[in-house]
Image (cartoon, grey):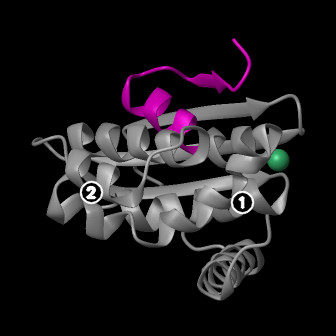
Amino acid sequence: MQPDGQDQDLLSLYQSIILDHGKSPRNTGRVERHDCSSEGRNPLCGDRVTVTAALDESDILTDLKFDAKGCAISIASASMMTEAAKGLTTDEVQRISDAVRILCIEKFSGEDINGFLGETLSARLESLRALSGVRQFPTRAKCALLPWQTLMACIQGNSTASTER
Ligand code: ZN
């Protein structure tokens, strides 16, 4: 099926967001005074992501950085993740992470996800919607989800994460 004009516009917008983050990733490096650190691997593609994060006493993610060697999707996803997750509580990060998984793997509409997240978190998800393009490519979905799995491992106190269990 040929996408209609509107879908085509959305797809090219999504592609340009991913290209932009892939070329000039935000928040790279390590948080010097971090509370957790985790290294994630996606053996299928060879992506590696290290996430470091700082949390305050109310479990708010006050700082978040990543170091990555991998494909453009994994790097773009990690970059968008750092922008989306900073300033959120660990519970909110978990909910966004679940929503990204839904976007990348399952066939939910945008409205379903907004209902699931509520208004404030939905706004955070805006640029992350660009990742939904990977849905057609299950191996690419693992690239997009790796940074989120690594961040959740970091928050939960696990020093490693893998897309393959
Ligand atoms: Zn990859």
- Amino acid found under the numbered disc labelled 1: Ile
Most foreground residue, 34 or 165: 165
Q: Secondary structure at mark 2?
A: helix
Q: Residue furthest top?
A: 165
Can you say whether 150 is above or below 4 in the image? above
Q: Position of residue 71 (x, y in %)?
A: 85, 56
Residue 60's disc is: none
Say few, some or many: other residues with alpha carbon within 10 Å of mark 2 (under 14 / 14 to 19 / 20 or more): some
- Amino acid found under the numbered disc labelled 2: Asn
The residue that label 1 is drawn on is 75
| The C terminus, quarter of image | top right
The residue that label 2 is drawn on is 114
Q: Residue furthest left?
A: 58
In whole angstroms, how far apart are the C-alphas of marks 1 and 2? Answer: 25 Å
Q: Position of residue 33 (x, y in %)?
A: 40, 50
Q: Is residue 67 visible?
A: yes
The answer to whether residue 149 is left or right of residue 115 is right
Q: Is residue 164 located in the magenta-colored stretch of the structure? A: yes
Which residue: 36% across, 57% down?
A: 85
Say few, some or many: other residues with alpha carbon within 10 Å of mark 1 (under 14 / 14 to 19 / 20 or more): many
Most foreground residue, 84 or 63: 84
Q: Is residue 65 located in the magenta-colored stretch of the structure? A: no
Most foreground residue, 40 or 116: 116
Which residue: 68% across, 48% down?
A: 135
Q: Is residue 34 visible?
A: no
Image-quadrant location for residue 138: top right
Which residue: 66% across, 49% down?
A: 144
> Which span is picked out in magenta?
147-165
Image-quadrant location for residue 49: top right
Do residues under tags 1 and 2 come within 8 Å of each other at their CB atoms?
Answer: no
